[in-house]
Image (cartoon, rainbow, N blue to C red):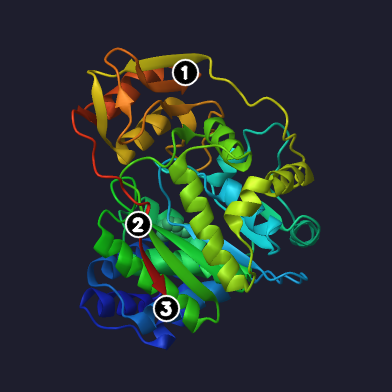
Amino acid sequence: MSPFAVDVIRAKRDGRRLSDEQIDWVVDAYTRGVVAEEQMAALAMAIFLRGMDDAEIERWTGAMVGSGSRLSLKVSRPTVDKHSTGGVGDKITLPLAPLVAACGAAVPQLSGRGLGHTGGTLDKLESIPGWRAALSPEEIAVQLESVGAVVCAATEGLAPADRKLYALRDVTGTVESIPLIASSIMSKKIAEGASGLVLDVKAGSGAFMKTVDDARRLAHTLVGIGSAHGVSCTALITDMNVPLGRAVGNAVEVAEAVEVLQGGGPADVVELTVALAGEMLALAGISADPAAVLASGAAYETWARMITAQGGDPSAPLPKPQHVHVVPAPESGVLASLDAYAVGVAAWRLGAGRARKGDPVQAAAGVLCHATLGDEVVAGEPLLELHTDTPDALPAALEALSGAYTVASAVPTARGIVLDTARA
Ligand code: URA
């Protein structure tokens, strides 16, 4: 064990700022295994409780980028990426990446797998028969040039300090810290090498940030790190009190994304896809109308090429669940609330998510919402459909949903999905 590590832990425990030298050393030494897991756990908790100032966060992020390699994206189009802080039913990457590529940008979207109640983009795409998440840096470059969009797993060498630290935070109650979340997200995105980045910072019950004020703070921190490291960033703060769209799970979310790409789909998914695409195109310096490109079918064509390039069959039927359990509306009226966190937990318990890293997920598991806020519902008619291959999971999923929705006589005021914007 390193005695220097104890000094760094004590400094943060006592509320002092860490020097550049301390930050560079501790991140590097942790990556190399010189700082022990229990020492980093103590430091993460000290950071969680005491925070870090902007200069510390920027330095910490830089040290995490420096723990690994950077992808060099040599493509002829401008590169721009999107990152979401994670929500329930958040399948936006699926229609967004091909849409922005169809408008003329290159979208390198290195994504993760789900942990806990928020789903992972790779888990969703793996429900498409044949689709492959692992690409080499060379394959990423070739696909970016030929198709314009790649959604794949982060390559091993990118920000290895974050991979270790994220797994540690997950089991030490230190995930929900703005400095740690912001540096974790931005280290991966800076290492990935896109020149522009749009952040979708979720606020609400289904998000890490439960309040709009906290989401705003996170958004400004993320954008500030981007500026300090030469990446142009814009952040949208968006609502995550209600699931996005009607589908929550893996294959069901792919099906909904395809509906959007074919000109249909739920209004909130379309609205957010077009809003994020507009910001990405602005950063890329491309003047195109994403709503018109979506309506033209060009984004769907790019989707089909993107899936095919990674071994998937875009026209193959998606997996179907072995069991479907229908939850009826308890009374007639208007759906007044539908709690995103509860629906996310239900989908997770049905098998769509994993409790531990490396667990398998069920492609067909999830929740299909027959109504969203403001829709009329009729007593006894289907309100939610629970999909699973393991019916033993149903009682726990139903328990998660108890008290998760209300039916009222008045229509709630319409919610806009984009609540605020943070720019550099
Ligand atoms: N996503 C990340 O990549 N890191 C976090 O810490 C939280 C969400």
Q: Which residue is mark 3?
A: 224
Q: Which residue is mark 1?
A: 390
**Residue 228 rendering spot, x and y as whole percentages:** 48, 83
Q: Residues within 10 Å of mark 3 (few under 14, many from 20)?
A: many
Give yes or no for contact between labels 3 and 2 (Cβ–Cβ under 8 Å).
Answer: no
**Residue 184 rendering spot, x and y as whole percentages:** 45, 65
Q: Classify mark 1: helix, strand or loop.
A: loop
Please give the label number shown on residue 243: none
Q: Which residue is mark 2?
A: 175
Q: Amino acid at mark 1?
A: Thr
Q: Residues within 10 Å of mark 2 (few under 14, many from 20)?
A: many
Label 2, label 1: how far apart the Cα atoms are: 30 Å
Return the disc, 3 or 2, that comes first in the chain's sequence.
2
Residue in view at x 42 percent, y 26 percent: 350
Q: Amino acid at mark 3?
A: Gly
Label 3, label 2: how far apart the Cα atoms are: 20 Å
Q: Residues within 10 Å of mark 1 (few under 14, many from 20)?
A: some
Return the disc, 2 or 1, that comes first in the chain's sequence.
2
Q: Dividing the picture into quarters, in which one does residue 314 lie? A: top right
Residue in view at x 74 percent, y 37 percent: 312
Q: Note whether ligand 1 is within 8 Å of mark 3.
A: no
